[in-house]
Amino acid sequence: MNDDRPRAGCRSAAARRTNAAWWKQLALAVPLAAWIGAGCTNRLPLPDEPVAEGTGTGEIAYVVQYRWLDVPRFGDMVLTVGILFVVEDSTRVRAYISDKATPVVNQGFSLPDPVVVGGQTLGKPVQLAAGVDKTLWVAFREPSNRLVQFKLTSPPTDTGLWVDAWQVQSIGGIAADADSGFVYVSDERGNQVAKYEPTSAGGNRVALLAVQGNGDLTVREPRGLYCYGDSLLVVDSGKNWIQVISADVAHSGRGQVLGPIDEPLVLHDPVDAWVDASGRYYVAEQGRVLQITPQGQIKEIVTDLDTQAAALPAAVVANTTQVWVADPLGMRCTIYQINTVSEELP
């Protein structure tokens, strides 16, 4: 995986700090100039929304692109087939057009409310994952813990495949293998991560990949999960870690993502994680969202310069240029975009 983006030139850290101070003076002017130069598009923030400034911790820097205000309380989110799927108020799953300045519901791809599968009404959706062949996995808590697969048609239809997660005490996160069709569940109270094979009869648990413990390849209060390649990125909330474990072999994998020796990765109450197409990690934790290399170096604090960033973000999804952050306490969802304006002095 390539951890470095092409850049206009190489500058020292001191030079970047000098440029950052200069840019802060122009923070209000740049967005207006960019807006005018772009033909007055709708990419300016909404009224009374501050524009993020500066250069962040690295050389990319994120700015607020859009902020969706007064939305229902967004829980887990997943970005797939260009659509943002969201758990709202723990009662329904809605689809949103992902790149609009204001929230626009895509009714055609939203799940029906209520969801009825096999003559049974399912309630309290809590987690989402993108599956194989343009499908969506939804974890429900009522009438019991189960995962159901939906084909992303308009409207979505259940495929008949599901997982009876009766062994799980509290679903902390789910993930799906985009190639094999296996699904994964983190059990926040049961302190384990399990792998399941879905079937039309409720599936089978095929492996316990991680169990309770304080060291590598064990977990405490695991939450967010993301499956990529043959690995799972696990938010090990009880230890304030993220870990990479094998998606196939129990008790194996890289273990804790440590960061550089001289600047180890320190997290604070992490809750969710995502991996973009370039291989970078995104972690939502108390008060901020981080972009991290697979080696554990913080490349950007995505929310660093946003004065209205979520105090307790619930979920994060991303592509290589944008990051979506759910803020249920503020009843908002903020979309951040990489600042592509050159940092060089004129």
Image (cartoon, rainbow, N blue to C red):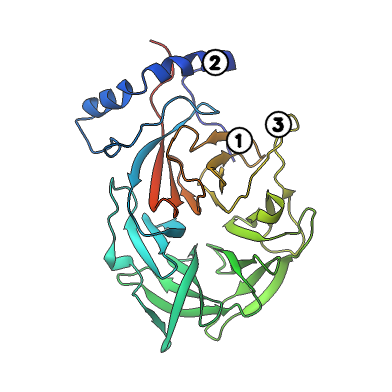
x and y, in percent, of residue 225 in the image: 59, 58
The kind of residue on which mark 3 rests is Glu
Looking at the image, is 19 positioned above or below residue 187? above
Label whose residue precedes the other's in the sequence (3 or 1): 3
Please rate how many residues cluster around mark 1, counting C-alpha atoms within 10 Å: few if below 14, some from 14 to 19, many from 20. Answer: many
Q: Quadrant of the C terminus?
A: top left
Looking at the image, is 117 positioned above or below residue 6? below
Q: Nearer the viewer, residue 4 or 119?
A: 119
The kind of residue on which mark 2 rests is Arg
- Image position of 277 (left or right of 191): left
x and y, in percent, of residue 151 in the image: 40, 71
Residue that extends furthest to the bottom in the rendered view of this protein: 119
Q: Which residue is mark 1?
A: 298
Q: Are marks 3 and 1 in contact (CB under 8 Å)?
A: yes
Q: Which residue is mark 2?
A: 11
- Image position of 184 (left or right of 153): right
How far, Cα to Cα, is label 1 from label 2?
18 Å
How far, Cα to Cα, is label 2 from label 3?
21 Å
x and y, in percent, of residue 259 in the image: 70, 37
Q: Which residue is mark 3?
A: 263
